[in-house]
Image (cartoon, helix red, strand yellow):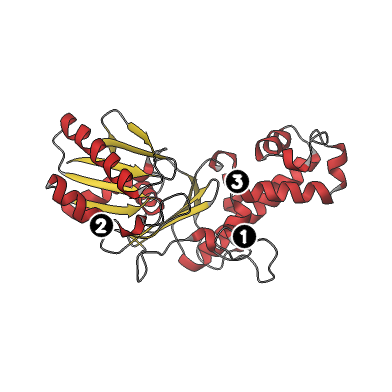
Amino acid sequence: MKIAGIDIGGTKISGAVIENGEIISEIIKEKTPYNSQKIIEIVFDIVEKLLNIADIKAIAIATAGAVNNDNSRVIGSTGNLPKDYPDIEFKKIFEEKFNIPCIIENDANAAAFAEYKIGAAKGSQSSITVTLGTGVGGGIILDGKILKGKSGAAGEVGHLMLGIKPERSCTCGEYNCFEAYGSGTGFRRTIQELSSMLPEFKTSILSDKTKEELTTFDVIAGYKNGDEFCKIAYETWENEIIIGLTSLANIFDPDNIVISGGLSGEVNYEKIEKTINDKIVTTPLKILPAKAGNYAGMIGAALLAEDKLV
């Protein structure tokens, strides 16, 4: 079944023809406007172009923001999308326009479904995909199904709280969320805090930089070159990842946790897996690098459409 896969993100909208979990056409990309009607118009245009390429049987949309249990509309937007974005009746609008079925799913849930169906978690029944990027996102698969919760907003693993005393604020307005420590943004905050606290910074290869100039890339490079300050900073971040993943493992007892996102390539999978399995009270699990690729969201949405429509 050929499906028009669409990914609506805060910075770009992408689309391609997807069949059996594979992208079989050129990927069309457009900048995301901060206007809901214009987003609709761009997606209309992309779908029309894809219809000219193949005999499309359905439209599958992965999007930032929580999506309801009917896979018909967004119920909670994100800061980089229009405030009225949740008002869009995606399923109704697109089915009326193109007269073919349409579903919409949260991009992290869709990516987790892609990993479960064709990626690193293929063959398992329960899996969690955690995305380590600017923030921390996630999707949870239990018994072969996306965990949605009562409204569709479940799976916000980045807002798992790691402590009680309010020490570090999160973008959600609360404190001590996994995202505030495990994300790229959180990692950088850790680096900056440690540069003011640790004497090792004075002899570091990064000592000529101001606190504001320090980046995760600097520390990862220094860590690989044996710099002591960078080693402490990296291992502090690594331990925060372990704390978050251990909590998830204890709650959901998955077969595996798949790690995706821009920082996924900087993770020591063997060490993290061993450490977590030494800590958890549930059965051992695998910690795996994602395999579904950069377009896992739209691929997962297309695979979900196939499951629902076949």
Q: Quadrant of the N terminus?
A: top left
Q: Is residue 123 visible?
A: no
Front tag of 1 and 2: 2
Q: Residues within 10 Å of mark 2 (few under 14, many from 20)?
A: few
The answer to whether 281 appears left or right of 165 in the picture is left
The answer to whether 91 appears left or right of 31 in the picture is left
| Circle 1 residue | 243
Point out residue 100 in the picture as x, y percentages from the top left corner: 13, 47
Marks 1/3: CA distance? 16 Å
Q: Earlier in the sequence, mark 1 or mark 2?
A: 2
**What residue is at 49 percent from the left and 56 percent from the top?**
285
Query: Dot 2 lies on which element?
Result: loop
Marks 2/3: CA distance? 33 Å
Point out residue 268 in the picture as x, y percentages from the top left corner: 60, 43
In this view, 161 is above or below 296: below
Total tally of numbered discs in the picture: 3
Mark number, residue 12: none
Instruction: Tell me the amino acid under the disc marked 2.
Output: Glu
Q: Residues within 10 Å of mark 3 (few under 14, many from 20)?
A: many
Front tag of 1 and 3: 3
Q: Earlier in the sequence, mark 2 or mark 3?
A: 2
Instruction: Tell me the amino acid under the disc marked 3.
Output: Gly
Point out residue 67 in the picture as x, y percentages from the top left corner: 34, 59
Point out residue 71 in the picture as x, y percentages from the top left corner: 27, 58
| Circle 3 residue | 184
